[in-house]
Image: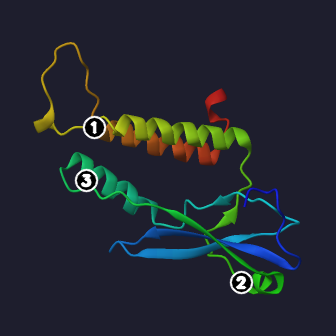
Amino acid sequence: MLGTIPFPERMGGSVYISYPDHSGMPVWQLLGFITNEKPSAIFKISGLKSGNYWLMSFWESNFMSRLFTPSVAQIGISVELLEQLAQQTPVANAAVSTVDSFTQFTQKMLDNFYNFASSFAVTQAQMTPNPTEAFIPANVVLKWYENFQRRLAQNPFFWKT
């Protein structure tokens, strides 16, 4: 799987992703495939799991003092005959990414900032008064994050204006 040894002749790999559902059970979904002729692919997976569910459960659990159970995504590759790969249908929301590298960088930077800022979140009960520190309400960061994502999706170069 390092790209140094090709698949055996007439073979390829189905690429799957798994993440826990609401009950914690893994859900496997086919994203697509890789072959010797197409040895790599970037799959857009943002629409596979209802994004608002994860985002809201993250915010609710961290900012409303609810228990947060992190979820773990897994990637699986099944080596199969090319004929079988051709008959499989990936999940509807999975697509090979056509986003340019600048947009990918911007999205990753946005996600990184959001995750970084969120990691410092505390409830009012957990706050220690400190007159030299300024606090920004978490919902302000969430609103900025959502607005930036929306604007980036509409026009990746909106920031140039």
What amino acid type should be assigned to the residue bearing mark 1? Ala
Left or right of 53, for residue 136 = left
- Identify the mark at residue 88; answer none if there is no mark: 2
SS type, badge 1 = loop
The residue located at (45%, 60%) in the rendering is 51
Gap in angstroms between the C-alphas marked 2 and 3: 38 Å
Describe residue 1's horizontal placement relative to residue 109 as left or right: right
Tell me the kind of residue under disc 3.
Ser
Residue receiving disc 3: 61
- Check contact, mark 2 vs mark 1: CB within 8 A: no
In the image, residue 144 above or below residue 98: above
Residue beneath the point at 15% across and 31% down: 127
Q: Which quadrant of the view contains residue 54?
A: bottom left
In this orientation, does residue 115 appear? yes
Q: Position of residue 139 (x, y in %)?
A: 31, 41
Q: Are marks 2 and 3 in contact (CB under 8 Å)?
A: no
User: Is 44 above or below relative to 143?
Assistant: below
Q: Is residue 161 visible?
A: no
